[in-house]
Amino acid sequence: MPEAGPPSRQASNYITREGYERLRAEHQELWKVERPRVTHQVSVAAALGDRSENADYIYGKRRLREIDSRLRFLEKRMEALQVVEPDSERDEDRVYFGAWVTLSGEDTDEVRYRVVGPDESDPGQGLISMDSPVGRALLGKSLGDEVIIQRPRGSIEYEIVAIGYEGAGAGPG
């Protein structure tokens, strides 16, 4: 049996319950609503005759391929994901997966992020991947810790001023 090499740098398979439910809802919407609607449109367009110049037919078939591709991706990804449930035994003053973290910088206003899995990352909504430079810098840190985050345009220093787990579904504000 060959010896295993070093682990590859790939995305984590962790996800919050809310993130998993969003993926599941997208899958259900595509499977139960979008795909049947587009299938009906394609069959109506096909009944009109010449398919080679029928834009509705051509677009509909392309859209069906896109939907089927996304459905396959979601099914495989959801099988691989591990939902991380909140742990009531955790230290509330330490940053773990799923935490909302408020940071204060010397030259910046406070910012608030939630550390999540890569599949639910949305920086505009304050959801940052645990695999991102910010996520990696925050995990395991405690309230009051100084955090230096390496960015392409230079490093920036923040202090962790709040850590929260209640209302995990709440937004960044």
Image (tube, rainbow, N blue to C red):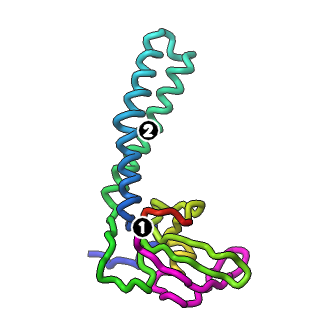
Instruction: Tell me which residue sits at (51%, 78%) in the image.
Output: 136
Residue 118 on image: x %, y %: 47, 64
**Mark 2 residue type:** Ile
**Mark 1 residue type:** Gly
Instruction: Tell me which residue sits at (38%, 67%) in the image.
Output: 14
Circle 1 residue: 167
- The image shows residue 59, relative to residue 43, as above or below, that is below
Side of 42 relative to 122 (left or right) = left
- The image shows residue 74, relative to residue 156, as above or below, that is above
Element on which disc 2 rests? helix
First-in-chain label (1 vs 2): 2
Instruction: Tell me which residue sits at (69%, 74%) in the image.
Output: 152
Q: Give how far apart the Cα atoms at labels 1 and 2 are.
A: 33 Å
Residue 42 on image: x %, y %: 44, 21
Q: Residues within 10 Å of mark 2 (few under 14, many from 20)?
A: some
Circle 2 residue: 67
Residue ranking furthest to the top: 49
Q: Nearer the viewer, residue 48 or 101?
A: 101
User: Could you tell me which quadrant the N terminus lies in?
Assistant: bottom left
Magenta part of the protein: which range? 139-167
Image depth: mark 1 or mark 2 in front: 1
Side of 107 relative to 138 (left or right) = right
Q: Identify the image quadrant of residue 17.
A: bottom left
Side of 154 relative to 100 (left or right) = right
Residue 74 forms part of the magenta stretch: no
Q: Nearer the viewer, residue 51 or 100?
A: 100
Instruction: Tell me which residue sits at (40%, 49%) in the image.
Output: 73
Element on which disc 1 rests? loop
